[in-house]
Image (cartoon, rainbow, N blue to C red):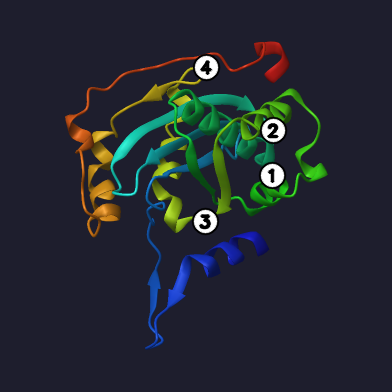
Amino acid sequence: MVEECSRVKCDMQRDRGGRVFESNWTPPQVGWVKLNVDAAVATVDHTVEIGGVVRDENGSWLFRYARFVGRCDVLLAEFWTIHDGLLHAWSMGYCRVELESDCLEAVRAINTNSDMMGDSVLVESIKRLLGQDWRVEVRYTSHEKNRIADLLAKRGRNMQLVPLRFVTHPVDLERLVEEETRDLPQSAASSQLVDIVAPFDLGGTEDELI
């Protein structure tokens, strides 16, 4: 309950007139891409789906990903989606990435190299990715600014266990995509891209990573 109350407080801001308004997605700095990630944990069987999206400073859709992970706790689920997001971004050749998650615990653990991350092949893979020849900034964002990643994560149940990458956004998210980027100058429209599915190696054996 405390975590949820804190999240709601962060999601709401006040202008000088005292009126409350909700935050919206903010673009990355010029020359960077923004990776928004999220995980969804089912309350019944504790299975996890993860997903995320990468966009440029104009809000143009670069790619999305989602997949079913299996059963694990909430923090580990967040580490999974951070891992896959970084893996996708690295494989696509992006060298300046702003990664945003609405899980403050996971962001703090990564930025402080906390013991909370534990000692596993998954954690070592995240550290190895962050140590590559690129710049990655891992930040906390409010749930309101992470809506698309949240919705993509919830679609992971029907996905495979292996990471898959898609270029275009789902048609039913068109309205939300336009809403988040309506005040930004648009470059190449994502709807003109041809959707692809791109699986790739996780960087370890399946038995090691599960």
How far is mark 4 from mark 2, CA to CA? 20 Å
- What is the number of the mark on residue 57? none
User: Does 28 appear above or below 119?
Assistant: below
- Circle 4 sits in a helix, a strand or a loop, which is it? loop
Answer whether labels 2 and 1 touch (C-beta < 8 Å). Answer: no
- Rounded to the nearest angstrom, the CA distance separating label 1 from label 3 is 15 Å
Q: Splitting the image into 4 quarters, where does residue 1 fall?
A: bottom right
Which residue lies at the image location 40% right of the left edge and 38% below the top edge? 54
Q: Position of residue 94 (x, y in %)?
A: 44, 33
Of tags 1 and 4, the one toward the viewer is 1
Q: CA distance from mark 3 to mark 2?
A: 21 Å
Whether label 3 touches label 2, CB < 8 Å: no
Q: Counting other residues with Cα less than 10 Å from the Cα at mark 3, is it few (<14), some (14-19), or many (20 or more)?
A: many
Q: Name the N-terminal-most of marks 2 and 1.
A: 1
Read off the residue under disc 3: 141
Mark 4: few, some, or many residues within 10 Å (few <14, many ≥20)? some
**Label 1 sits on what residue type?**
Ile
Residue 33 in view here = yes
Residue for badge 2: 127
Labels 4 & 2 near each other (Cβ < 8 A): no
* Dot 3 amino acid type: Thr
Q: Are marks 3 and 4 in contact (CB under 8 Å)?
A: no
**Secondary structure of residue under mark 1:** helix
Does 103 sit above or below residue 132?
Answer: below
Q: Earlier in the sequence, mark 4 or mark 2?
A: 2
- Residue carrying label 1: 110
Circle 1 packing at 10 Å, graded few (<14), some (14-19), many (20+), is many
> Earlier along the polypeptide chain: callout 3 or callout 4?
3
Residue 142 at x, y = what percent?
51, 58
Q: CA distance from mark 2 to mark 1?
A: 8 Å
Task: Determine which residue is flagged by label 4.
Answer: 162
Gap in angstroms between the C-alphas marked 1 and 4: 23 Å
